Image (cartoon, coloured by chain):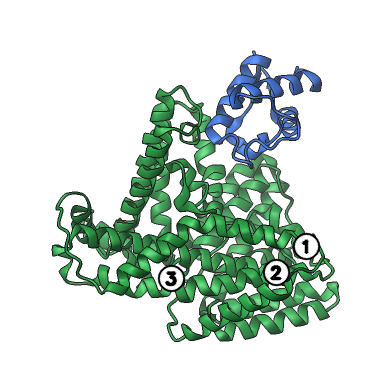
């Protein structure tokens, strides 16, 4: 079972802050603003998979699916699966 | 009907006036009719090609949505058909010539071949839009619209020739044409159109006269180091002002009917790194490559280093070939793949992070190295053969001689445009600030005096240089 939305949101905030090296507001655009690139998005996905013990099928997604914290939560809820 | 012609400006004037006089319900029909007339004006024989692409996307998209279990099959069927069309028109001659010589035809021309073949204009661009559309339907990002809506998307005349390459989700909602006229549509559109005409007809075309002489000259074997650099820089400036000029005309045209197209350029020669260059040059192509090639490939490999470097070189080589069927384009793309890989390796060694943006000596070195590498890359892109490209690159980097063999005007115009490029961000900032001073709807000296005078000056320059009707470089791709 996937973690609840609040847990996903906290994990997304933490991963985004770790990648950018600073605190990230929920509405802050990460990819379209150039703050992180597509490779950093892959790192973000990997961090979230480890933190939350879930699987995110990244090959069916696009970097802008991870453009802000709300979108990250929405994307995981849409396509994420619980890990083994 | 080229964007930089009086015929087109007349066509645009009539269509825009009628568009705003029409009720919203009739505008879609008007835009579709205008788009078909515009495309047919290039070559009526090829009108069926974008229609066929729209039909394939419509049928395969519907099948993808209707049969989730067979979605993959219909996705690849659709992609296969549109790529087959592209290959048949654009790469057939190149493939036959090279396969018959088992790859030994390395001296085949690139730039000159691309411009001499006849194929449906814009096919490279709407093929990429079609592939993106099918993948977006497969991933549930867009719903399939009616066939007429889809035709409107593919035929939309402001961007059918050479982009910007659009996603369905950014253009489709705007194609209802329900907006009420606002003066800013006219100002923003005319700003772009006048500046685009000056960029193309005045700056790019004048540089192009010298670039054509230099790259087409017979004495390239004895080219000096200074002339090699000036020639490469002049072409770098020519292609930038040519394509940015086209893009401004496309964005400005769409703005006149209230549609907002995405930007394609952001001062690319100010890039801080090879990766940053592709965030500033042909941005909608970079976005397409990132979303539909680079990201899915590397997602499969979880961003591992070796697949990352190989995919960068492979994908960029394909991007080179997308520009045209020639070894020069392939080499240009592969060079950029190598630049990007080297930069990623450097970032990896530093432990990640955006080193080039951090400031300091290494940032300065990356900025300079990127500029030099990008300019060097333009040589195989433009040279009529790999042998000539090698000779020019040899003059630039190995055989140092200092003769100046072109007319003084060539050096002066190249230096002047280089200086303009260097201060372009400052000029744009000053113009934006002047425009914002009066607020959203107020009047200012800038709006009532400077802007009309600038339009008049720009159009006068365009008319003075109008005798040189060269086509846009990217309309050949």
Q: Position of residue B317 (x, y in %)?
A: 37, 48
Is B248 placed above or below A22 here?
A: below
Image quarter of residue B223: bottom left
Q: Colour of chain A?
A: blue
Chain under disc 3: B
Q: Position of residue B107 (x, y in %)?
A: 21, 60
Callout 1: few (<14), some (14-19), or many (20+) C-alpha neighbours within 10 Å? Answer: some
- Residue located farthest toward the front when viewing the structure as drawn: B445
Residue B436 lies left or right of residue B421; in this view the side is: right
Which label lies toward us, 3 or 1? 1
Chain under disc 1: B
Could you tell which of marks 1 and 2 lies nearer the N-terminus? 1
Residue that carries the numbered disc 3 in the rendered image? B204
Q: Position of residue B329 (x, y in %)?
A: 35, 56
Image quarter of residue B409: bottom left
Could you tell which of marks 3 and 1 lies nearer the N-terminus? 3
> In the drawing, what numbered circle is on residue B438?
1
Please determine if labels 1 and 2 lie on a single subunit.
yes
Question: Which SS class for mark 3?
Answer: helix
């Amino acid at each position: 079972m996937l973690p609840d939305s609040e847990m996903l949101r906290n994990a997304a905030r933490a991963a985004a802050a770790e990648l950018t090296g600073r605190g990230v507001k929920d509405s802050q655009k990460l990819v379209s603003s150039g703050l992180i690139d597509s490779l950093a998005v892959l790192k973000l996905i990997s961090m979230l998979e480890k933190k939350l013990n879930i699987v995110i099928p990244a090959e069916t997604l696009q970097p802008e699916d991870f453009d802000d914290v709300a979108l990250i939560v929405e994307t995981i809820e849409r396509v994420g699966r619980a890990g083994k | 009907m080229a964007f930089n012609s009086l015929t087109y400006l007349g066509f645009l004037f009539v269509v825009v006036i009628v568009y705003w006089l029409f009720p919203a319900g009739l505008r879609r029909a008007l835009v579709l009719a205008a788009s078909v007339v515009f495309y047919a004006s290039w070559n009526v024989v090829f009108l069926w090609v974008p229609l066929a692409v729209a039909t394939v996307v419509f049928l395969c998209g519907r099948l993808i949505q209707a049969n989730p279990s067979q979605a993959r099959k219909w996705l690849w069927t659709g992609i296969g058909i549109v790529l087959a069309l592209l290959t048949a028109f654009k790469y057939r001659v190149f493939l036959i010539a090279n396969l018959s010589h088992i790859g030994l035809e390395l001296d085949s021309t690139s730039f000159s071949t691309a411009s001499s073949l006849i194929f449906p204009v814009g096919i490279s661009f709407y093929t990429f839009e079609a592939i993106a559309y099918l993948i977006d339907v497969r991933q549930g990002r867009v719903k399939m619209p009616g066939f007429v809506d889809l035709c409107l998307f593919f035929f939309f005349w402001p961007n059918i020739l050479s982009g910007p390459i659009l996603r369905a989700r950014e253009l489709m909602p705007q194609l209802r044409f329900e907006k009420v006229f606002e003066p800013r549509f006219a100002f923003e559109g005319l700003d772009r159109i006048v500046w685009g005409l000056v960029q193309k007809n005045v700056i790019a075309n004048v540089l192009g006269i010298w670039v054509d002489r230099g790259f087409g000259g017979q004495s390239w074997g004895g080219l000096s180091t200074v002339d090699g650099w000036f020639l490469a820089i002049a072409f770098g400036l020519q292609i930038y002002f040519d394509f940015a000029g086209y893009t401004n005309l496309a964005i400005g045209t769409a703005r006149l009917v209230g549609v907002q197209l995405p930007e394609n350029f952001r001062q690319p020669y100010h890039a801080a790194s090879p990766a940053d260059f592709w965030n500033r040059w042909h941005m909608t192509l970079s976005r397409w490559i990132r979303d539909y090639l680079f990201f899915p490939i590397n997602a499969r490999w979880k961003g591992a280093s070796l697949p990352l470097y190989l995919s960068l070189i492979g994908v960029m080589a394909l991007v080179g070939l997308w520009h045209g069927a020639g070894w020069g384009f392939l080499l240009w793309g592969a060079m950029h793949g190598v630049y990007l890989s080297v930069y990623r390796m450097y970032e990896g060694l530093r432990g990640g992070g955006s080193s080039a943006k951090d400031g300091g000596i290494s940032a300065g070195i990356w900025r300079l190295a990127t500029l030099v590498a990008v300019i060097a890359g333009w040589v195989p892109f433009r040279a009529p053969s790999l042998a000539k490209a090698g000779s020019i690159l040899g003059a630039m980097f190995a055989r140092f001689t200092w003769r100046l063999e072109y007319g003084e005007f060539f050096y002066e115009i190249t230096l002047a445009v280089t200086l303009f490029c260097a201060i372009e961000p400052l000029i744009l900032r000053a113009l934006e600030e002047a425009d914002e001073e009066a607020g959203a709807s107020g009047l200012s000296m800038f709006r009532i005096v400077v802007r009309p005078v600038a339009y008049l000056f720009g159009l006068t320059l365009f008319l003075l240089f109008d005798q040189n009707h060269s086509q846009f470089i990217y309309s050949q791709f």
